[in-house]
Image (cartoon, grey):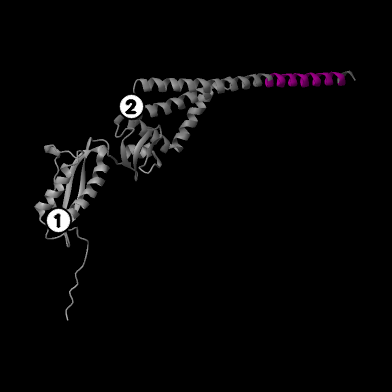
C-alpha cells in the first residue's frame, strides 16, 4: 500500500509540475503576445509619423519627384521589415536564427522571384541614369502616357484618356522607350496633298503664311518653317509642312495647323484631291 501511495504521490507531483510549467508558459506567452500587439500598433504609428516627416523634409528640400516616390516606397518597406523583426524578438523567437532563416529563405525566394529582383534593379537604374522623370510623356512596352510615379518595382503611367498603366521597371530599364518630353522642342510634320495644276509657289506661300501667324511655331533660322514638295503621286502632288514648336505644344500645333490648312486651301480655291480612277470606254 505504501508503495502504491508513493507512486500516486510522485505522479501527482509530476502532473502538478507539468501543469505549473504549462501555466507559466501560457502566462509568459500571453505577456509576450500582448507586448507584440502593443509594439505592432506603436510601430505602425511611429512608421506613419516617420514617413510623413521624411516626406515633408523631401518636399521642403525639393527632391526630384522620381527619387521622392522611390525613396518613399523603399523606406516604408524597410521600416515594416524592422517592425517584423522586433515583433518576432518579443515573441521569444531568436532573431539571429530568424535572420539566418530569412536569409536562406531569401535565396530560394530570390531565385523564384528573379523577375521581381530584376524590377528592383531596374528601378535603381532608372533613378541613376534618369532616362525619364515624373511628368515626362513616354512610350514603352507598347504603352504611352505621362509618368505619374516611379516606384521600387514598377512605374505608373497615366494615358491621355486617363487610364492607369503599371509597367515593371525591369523592362523599362532594359528595353527601348521614347521620351517625348526629353527635348525642349519637337518638329511637327504635316503632309498636304493638292491637285495637279496647282502652282507650287502659291501653295507654299499659303502654307507658310499659316505657319508665320501662329506664335507657337518657331521662326529662328535653325527652326524656321520648311515646306518642301515631297512627291508626285498618281492623283496629287504632296507637300510636307515641317515646323518646330515647344514639346508641350506639339499636339495643339499639329491639330490646329491641319485644320487651318484645310480651311485656307478651300478659301484660296486650291483643290484638295481625293483618290479617283478615270475609266475611258472605247467603242
Q: Residue at x 48, y 28 (%)?
A: 103
Residue 275 x %, y %: 22, 62
Residue projecting furthest to the bottom: 283
Determine the main secondary structure of the stretch shown in magenta: helix
Q: For mark 2, what is the residue?
A: 64
Q: Secondary structure at mark 2?
A: loop
Mark closer to the observer (1, 2)? 1
Q: Quadrant of the C terminus?
A: bottom left
Residue closest to the eye, 157 or 283: 283
Q: Which residues are drawn in magenta?
A: 4-26
> Does the segment drawn in magenta span residue 152?
no
Residue 240 placement, left or right of 170: left
Q: For mark 1, what is the residue?
A: 231
Residue closest to the eye, 257 or 147: 257
**Vertical placement of 200 versus 64: above or below?**
below
Residue 233 x %, y %: 16, 60
**Vertical placement of 168 versus 93: above or below?**
below
Q: Residue at x 18, y 55 (%)?
A: 193
Residue 143 placement, left or right of 251: right
- The answer to whether residue 71 is visible is yes
Residue projecting furthest to the front: 267
* Count of residue discs: 2
Q: Quadrant of residue 93?
A: top right
Residue 271 x %, y %: 17, 58
Q: Secondary structure at mark 1?
A: strand
Q: Quadrant of residue 64?
A: top left
| Mark 1 crowdedness (10 Å alpha carbons): few <14, some 14-19, many ≥20 | few
Q: N-terminal of the two: label 1 or label 2?
A: 2
Residue closest to the eye, 160 or 194: 194
Q: Residue at x 17, y 48 (%)?
A: 241
Amino acid at each position: 500500500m505504501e508503495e502504491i501511495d508513493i507512486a500516486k504521490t510522485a505522479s501527482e507531483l509530476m502532473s502538478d509540475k507539468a501543469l505549473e510549467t504549462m501555466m507559466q508558459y501560457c502566462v509568459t506567452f500571453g505577456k509576450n503576445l500582448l507586448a507584440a500587439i502593443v509594439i505592432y500598433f506603436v510601430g505602425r504609428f511611429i512608421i506613419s509619423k516617420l514617413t510623413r516627416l521624411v516626406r515633408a523634409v523631401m518636399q521642403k528640400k525639393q527632391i526630384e519627384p522620381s527619387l521622392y516616390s522611390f525613396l518613399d516606397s523603399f523606406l516604408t518597406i524597410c521600416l515594416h521589415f524592422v517592425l517584423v523583426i522586433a515583433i518576432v524578438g518579443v515573441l521569444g523567437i531568436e532573431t539571429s536564427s530568424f535572420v539566418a532563416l530569412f536569409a536562406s529563405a531569401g535565396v530560394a525566394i530570390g531565385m523564384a522571384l528573379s523577375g521581381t529582383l530584376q524590377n528592383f534593379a531596374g528601378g535603381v537604374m532608372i533613378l541613376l541614369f534618369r532616362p525619364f522623370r515624373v511628368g515626362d510623356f513616354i512610350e514603352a512596352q507598347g504603352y504611352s502616357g505621362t509618368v505619374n510615379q516611379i516606384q521600387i518595382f514598377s512605374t505608373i503611367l497615366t494615358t491621355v484618356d486617363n487610364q492607369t498603366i503599371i509597367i515593371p521597371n525591369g523592362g523599362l530599364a532594359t528595353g527601348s522607350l521614347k521620351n517625348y518630353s526629353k527635348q525642349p522642342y519637337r518638329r511637327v510634320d504635316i503632309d498636304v496633298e493638292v491637285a495637279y495644276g496647282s502652282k507650287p509657289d502659291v501653295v507654299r506661300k499659303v502654307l507658310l503664311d499659316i505657319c508665320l501667324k501662329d506664335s507657337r511655331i518657331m521662326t529662328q533660322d535653325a527652326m524656321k518653317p520648311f515646306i518642301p514638295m515631297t512627291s508626285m503621286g498618281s492623283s496629287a502632288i504632296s507637300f510636307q509642312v515641317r515646323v518646330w514648336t515647344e514639346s508641350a505644344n506639339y499636339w495643339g500645333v499639329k491639330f490646329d495647323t491641319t485644320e487651318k490648312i484645310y480651311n485656307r486651301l478651300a478659301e484660296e480655291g486650291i483643290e484638295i484631291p481625293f483618290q479617283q480612277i478615270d475609266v475611258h470606254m472605247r467603242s
